[in-house]
Image (cartoon, rainbow, N blue to C red):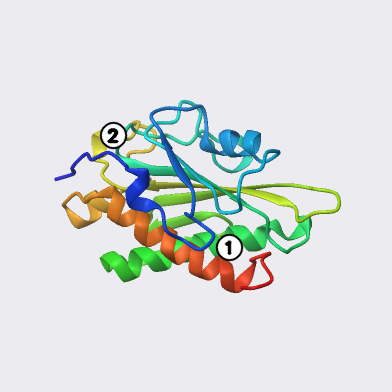
């Protein structure tokens, strides 16, 4: 059934924007918090932080996001989109739609986006998105895009509270997969669609 494999940054790098620089942490409070702290520095747009485990992962409205060690994709992206800070919902929709489409294209999963930020397979949640924007005077605003995707979970990896409401790719397909392959496909799709819709680089 599910397999456990470690994420490797060198396998995931390669996007023009998203995924051009990547680090993988063994454990952190929240990948969104890591990116938010780095946003003030000279880090490039599209920089990604993955974590094998989050101690304090979170979703919309401060809800806790369970992050079973080595079982899912828990990562955040630093972006500087050419949009007003009031338009952050556009980013949330873009990410959710891209995740849903990638899962359909790569694994033939019948997915649906439940606004504003959740992706479902059937009546169970498989992924979620958390976008946090910060104003930057005289410069494109900073957006921290957090993604949580259940990949190689078994039912026992979910808390009793979530067991009847959550699912994973492995549960649906009845087999595990290499998370690096999924992460690379997702990063490529996010990179392509971001460049089309939001990129701040004039040459794109």
Q: Position of residue 37 (x, y in %)?
A: 64, 33
Viewer-side residue, 96 vs 110: 96
Name the outermost residue toward the right: 138
Count neighbours of disc 2 (C-alpha within 10 A) and say few if under 14, some if 14 to 19, many if 20 or more: some
The answer to whether residue 169 is left or right of residue 192 is left
1 or 2: tag closer to the N-terminus? 1
Would you place residue 143 above or below residue 50 in this image? below
Residue at the image point whose x is 56% and y is 53% from the top: 46
Residue at the image point whose x is 29% and y is 66% from the top: 106
Q: Secondary structure at mark 1?
A: helix
Q: In what quadrant of the picture does the C terminus appear?
A: bottom right
**Residue 122 in view of the camera:** no
The answer to whether residue 106 is left or right of residue 113 is left
Residue at the image point whose x is 57% and y is 69% from the top: 195
Would you place residue 28 above or below residue 153 in this image? above
Q: Which residue is mark 2?
A: 157
Query: What label sits on residue 118 in the rendered view?
Result: none
**Residue 15 in view of the camera:** yes
Q: Position of residue 123 (x, y in %)?
A: 38, 56
Q: Secondary structure at mark 2?
A: helix
Q: Which residue is mark 1?
A: 93
Q: In what quadrant of the picture does the N terminus appear?
A: top left
Residue at the image point whose x is 34% and y is 43% from the top: 72
Which dot, 1 or 2, sits closer to the camera?
1
Q: Quarter of the image holding residue 91?
A: bottom right
Q: Position of residue 32 (x, y in %)?
A: 57, 39
Viewer-side residue, 53 vs 201: 201
């Amino acid at each position: 059934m599910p397999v456990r494999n470690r994420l490797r940054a060198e396998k995931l790098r390669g996007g023009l924007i998203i995924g051009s620089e990547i680090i993988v942490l063994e454990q952190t409070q929240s990948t969104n918090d890591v990116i938010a702290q780095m946003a003030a520095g000279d880090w490039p747009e599209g920089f990604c932080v993955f974590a094998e485990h989050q101690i304090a992962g979170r979703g919309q409205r401060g809800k806790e996001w369970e992050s079973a060690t080595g079982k899912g994709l828990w990562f955040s992206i630093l972006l500087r989109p050419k949009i007003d800070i009031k338009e952050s919902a556009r980013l949330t929709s873009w990410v959710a739609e891209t995740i849903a489409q990638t899962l359909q294209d790569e694994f033939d999963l019948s997915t649906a986006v439940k606004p504003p930020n959740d992706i479902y397979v059937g009546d169970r949640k498989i992924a979620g998105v958390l976008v946090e924007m910060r104003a930057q005077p005289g410069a494109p605003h900073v957006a921290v895009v957090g993604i949580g995707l259940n990949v190689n979970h078994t039912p026992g990896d979910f808390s009793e509270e979530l067991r009847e409401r959550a699912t994973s790719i492995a549960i649906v397909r009845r087999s595990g997969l290499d998370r690096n392959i999924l992460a690379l496909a997702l990063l490529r799709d996010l990179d392509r669609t971001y460049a089309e819709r939001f990129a701040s680089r004039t040459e794109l």
